[in-house]
Image: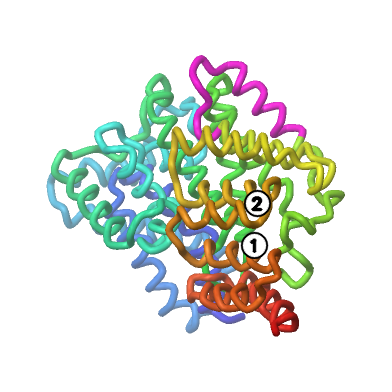
Amino acid sequence: MNTDATLAATVRMEGTRILATLVRTVGSLQIAEDAVQEAALRALRDWPRNGVPDEPRAWLTVTARRVAIDLLRREGARAQKERASVELAVPDLPPDSVVADDRLRLIFTCCHPALGLEAQVTLALRTLCGLSPAQIAAVLLTSEAAVAKRLTRTRQKIARAAIPYRVPADEDLPARLAAVCAVLHAFYTIAHTASGGERLTDVDGTQEALRLARIVHELMPDEPSSMAVLALLLLTEARRAARIDPAGDPVPLSEQDRSLWDADAIQDGLRLLDESLRRSETVADPYQLQAAIAAEHARAASYQTTDWVEIVRLYDLLLSVQPSGPAALARAVAVAEFEGAAAGLRELDRLSPDHRWQAVRGELLARQHRFTEAVAVTRASLTDSVPAPERRHRQRRIAEWSAHQD
């Protein structure tokens, strides 16, 4: 067995769980991160010589815990008390705490009210997913430099204000729900639309986000936001089997075999959305609106019978409460479906271009038989950030349209 590959897979799949468990016992994110990193380095030295252990995750967890204890010892007298807590495995909350899942505990812990919402979400994504600033920037629609600065400032504030990495008491959980929902949605989005690489979707990531969203809903079953987030994830995940072809390449919504959609997930998502809207006392929040858009697609018997007018209306509401480039781009696509390609292109002209904008523009130009322009703009969309499956799909489009050029 390739030790490097085994270690990489273990860290990718289990690293954040190990980190979450360690944070719970040491109470310090920095020490936990350093300990996990050192454990991985020791594995690189030890596994090629002695063989990959039968339980790689357990080996890394035990090693990281020992490293953490050593790090705490070095902190001196103040750390002695913390070290005793680690060795006795005393949890931060009583044993009957409702937050039993270590990874979810870490999300709630990162979402401390002393930090701003953006800082909470950024820290949780870095800690929970092990994402780079570039990956976080892509999903939060900001720059890599801004994310790096935000992480630095957040860690400095935590150290300066001595903000503890401690799970809140049960009665304080609702105050952190908005940030937790934002983290889960971003976590799922990143996995659902993997940037770069050979996979269009990180299935392990989407399933983990769904698992955590279900736990949050179980913890707070009466909260409209937790219902809406779970509904959105279910309605989106329901289409996964039809969204990717056997080669791993994307299948456009218009070409998907709807018999492959998960009917049970759709029914659960629709039920949760209806209940979320019924329990809301204010206007719909962004998760409810996004779930409502997904519900319109799920209810349609075919692409041709989709209620695009209603979808545009929902996007208008979404953009009024949470403006974003991706939502505006999706709205332009919906406009093109019921008003025609020319109307969609006019909507695109109002937006800032990126590789997704270029790909959409290429499709709309091709509908107007402007194949030379469609080929040019789609070629320009083939940036390094485009996943390989999406790149292949766009290249096939270019080949099809090139055959129609004058």
- Spot occupied by residue 17 in the image (x, y as percentages of width and height): 48, 52
- Spot occupied by residue 45 in the image (x, y as percentages of width and height): 41, 79
The quadrant holding residue 43 is bottom left
- Looking at the image, which is closer to me, 283 or 178? 283
Q: Dot 1, crowdedness within 10 Å: few (<14), some or many (≥20)?
A: many
Contact, mark 1 vs mark 2 (Cβ under 8 Å): yes
Q: Residue at x 62, y 61 (%)?
A: 201
Q: Is residue 271 above or below residue 103?
A: above
Q: Residue at x 51, y 64 (%)?
A: 12
The answer to whether any part of residue 6 appears in the image is no
The answer to whether any part of residue 344 appears in the image is yes
Q: Which residue is mark 2?
A: 336
- Looking at the image, which is closer to me, 29 or 63? 29
Q: Specify start and end residues of the magenta stretch as a single range.
A: 267-287
Q: Earlier in the sequence, mark 1 or mark 2?
A: 2
- Majority SS type along the magenta span: helix
Q: Is residue 323 left or right of residue 255?
A: left
- Spot occupied by residue 313 in the image (x, y as percentages of width and height): 60, 34
| Picture mark count | 2
